[in-house]
Image (spheres, rainbow, N blue to C red):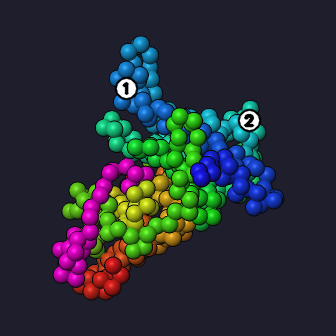
Amino acid sequence: MSRSVITIERHIIEAERQFPEATGAFSNILYDIALAGKMISREVRRAGLVDILGYTGGTNVHGETVKKLDEYAHEVIFKALDHCGHLCAMASEEAEDILHIPEQFPTGNYVLLYDPLDGSSNIDVNVSVGTIFSVHRKISAAERGGMEDVLQPGTRQVAAGYVVYGSSTMLVYTTGNGVHGFTLEPSIGEFLLSHPNIEIPSPGQRIYSVNEGNYSRWSKGQQRMVDYMKGMDTENPEPFSARYVGSMVADFHRTLLYGGMFMYPADARNPEGKLRLLYEAAPMAMIAEQAGGMASDGERPIMSIQPRDLHERTPLYIGSRDCVEMAERFLAEDQKGAKPGSGSAAIAAVV
Ligand code: AHM
Ligand code: MG
């Protein structure tokens, strides 16, 4: 007997029925994000034709000026949601300031934050990229929203998700009731439930994911942890595997399904790390926590950080609970000024 097919629309409607007081506003926001994801997916699939079709930021063969794909993705999401009447404002990694809903459209009680095309430098070499989003409730009295509405800590997110444009296109999201993954069936243009109730394995596969080219700029604790995971420490003779795509959405997606840890630490050149708190770290932290994993800046939960700036950065350690706890222990050695190698015995119990 064939299994029943659950589209993302059906999944959202069934979730909404559990809340009789729901107005449907929140569900509409999620549909519109899914629609924007499909449109971006279509263009990413054509990115190999970049010299013919454009998206170079320059001029195409017809002599027309064309947008870069990340600018296109930024606009598609804004335009898919600006008129729905459910948002009072948006903020995008591609825009310096808060994005207000145009005057001609009604406003609503939510705000959307998004990174339209994360890892976009990978497009030209046919490597996976992704869109990341999160939704908050409006908290200010301003009809068209204000900074207070977009600068909220991760704990106040009411939904978070991402779309990964990989060998297939997948949308993964949470509304605080587990994490669910949908794969785009291109012939019918629908996201179908393929990964219900995703849980990060813990202990998961022994995989670490980091740009190790920055090793010389890391703190001692960070260096010792990676040495430990590479089996260079007598306490851990069994090395982890290393995997690093360089697109956070792809690296996080693997971590969500297989376990292990993705990190983008602080380093001497980027003392706050590279990734953005609001557009990258906080949404993924909500997903990780909902999947039974953990996300930390090395000391405290990412979800607890009160943002001060729209484009604030944070170090990030995210994945299986045991791995992220291990990271916090190694990094705590930096605070104590411990000597190299001194923490490994305590850490060994965790892995
Ligand atoms: P972007 O927002 O400019 O695309 O940068 C974010 C990306 C992440 O997807 C990825 O994890 C990271 O940058 C890779 O950085 P690096 O090249 O320093 O390893
Ligand atoms: Mg990004």
Which circle marks residue 152 in the picture?
Answer: none
Q: According to the image, label 1 marks what residue?
A: 49
The residue carrying pointer 2 sits among few (fewer than 14), some (14 to 19) or many (20 or more) residues within 10 Å by Cα, namely few
- Residue 30 vertical placement versus 104 (above, below): below
Q: Quadrant of residue 216?
A: bottom left
Figure label count: 2
- Distance from disc 1 to disc 2, alpha carbons, whole Å, reads 36 Å
Label 2's element? loop
Can you tell me whether the CB of the residue at mark 1 lies under 8 Å from the nearest atom of ligand 1? no
**For residue 20, what is the image quadrant?**
bottom right
Left or right: 209 in relation to 129 = left
Q: Residue at x 44, y 20 (%)?
A: 65
Residue 202 higher or lower than 65, as above or below: below
Q: Of helix, strand and loop, which mostly describes the magenta segment?
A: loop
Task: Give the amino acid at mark 1.
Answer: Leu
Q: Amino acid at mark 2?
A: Phe
Q: Is residue 31 visible?
A: yes
Image point (40%, 57%), residue name = 254
What is the x, y in percent for residue 305? 52, 66
Mark 1 against mark 2, which lies toward the viewer?
1
Q: Is residue 35 left or right of residue 351?
A: right
- Residue 306: tell me if it is visible: no
> Residue 281's spot in the image, x, y percent?
47, 59
**For mark 1, does the 10 Å Cα neighbourhood hold few (<14), some (14 to 19), or many (20 or more) residues?**
few
Residue under label 2: 105
User: Is 233 placed above or below 200 here?
Assistant: below
Q: Is residue 282 magenta?
A: no
Compared across the picture, whether 142 is left or right of 152 comes to right
- At horizontal 18% and vertical 74% (from top left) the residue drawn is 232
Q: Which residues are magenta?
A: 228-251
